[in-house]
Image: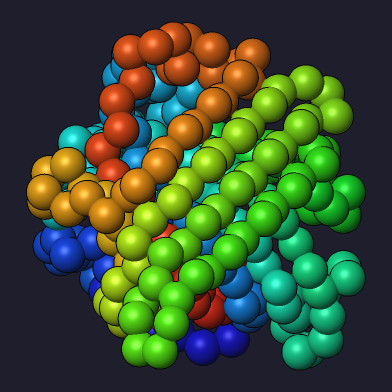
Amino acid sequence: MQKRCILVLFLLGISLIGKPSLTQPCWAETLVQSTAETRLMVALRVGQAELQKLVPTPLHVTPVPGGPFKEANFFVVFIDAFLVHDAQGKPDMGGILRLVVFAVPAKHSQTGEMVTVVISGFSASPDYVPGAYKNYVPATIRREQTHKGANLEAGVGIDFWEVQGTRGGIIELRLQYQRALPSRAKAEQKIYSAVEPSFFRIYRLDTATDMVKSIPAGIDRVQNYQLRVAVPELSKLFDGTEQLVGISVIPMYLRQVFLP
């Protein structure tokens, strides 16, 4: 166990080209897991009142205040972890994991901190059901990824995800985009559970992020985008009024996970 004071950055620990929180809490930490992943994140604006019903007190939905995801209040996070280790550095429950997670930016009313809340998710591994946040359900998850380029060109990326929940629910994502040099950043973040709001984990991250679309920042290198979320418990959020705010592709996401 070691005690560290850390700067908490907002929104799943990625560099957002925005302002970090000025809160600097201190806590003891115990390493429980480390991962090497690629991620793809879709930022949306959905109905605030309906969304708050899925987030328990003392956590309150708070749209991203600035940066390329400004005003987003809901995130669909596609996770492809190709190396998962436990605290001893051994493969954790098979060492490979694919997830799709629904996350919400929020403010903790007791501490004033900006945090992220996991409200639910789909896991391809039965060992991660219900998972650390106690709200993952089993699913079959298929991903197809292609990169096309020549010589020193950044090239074009194509990503396809298909998720079929074994208890119901379908997610499909099709994305084609012009690649660019990613932005490298290190960050730390608290991730809370919507099922048990007193529980959180601490992520320490080293990431490379390619912001392929941001309506607030006027970035658009997306050539094709289709997202379908047909999940019964989220039907009031995906009723046709949801709005796309931005998309980030994260080809490098190195994560250490700690418990306080």
Judge by depth and name the residue closer to the eye, 112 or 160. Answer: 160
Judge by depth and name the residue closer to the eye, 13 or 249. Answer: 249
Judge by depth and name the residue closer to the eye, 56 or 245. Answer: 245
Q: Which quarter of the figure is the N terminus placed in?
A: bottom right
| Residue at image point 30% right, 72% down | 180
Residue 141: x and y in percent read: 76, 45
Q: Is residue 134 above or below residue 111?
A: above
Q: Is residue 114 above or below residue 122?
A: below
Q: Residue furthest front?
A: 150
Residue 191: x and y in percent read: 48, 54
| Residue at image point 40% right, 89% down | 151
Q: Is residue 231 above or below residue 184?
A: above
Residue 248: x and y in percent read: 36, 56
| Residue at image point 34% right, 20% down | 242
Query: How many numbered marks does the figure carry?
Result: 0
Q: Is residue 212 visible?
A: yes
In this rendering, position of residue 257 left or right of residue 192: right
Judge by depth and name the residue closer to the eye, 196 or 155. Answer: 155
Residue 189: x and y in percent read: 40, 64
| Residue at image point 71% right, 37% down | 163
In this rendering, position of residue 138 left or right of residue 20: right
Task: Give residue 260's quadrant in the image.
Answer: bottom right
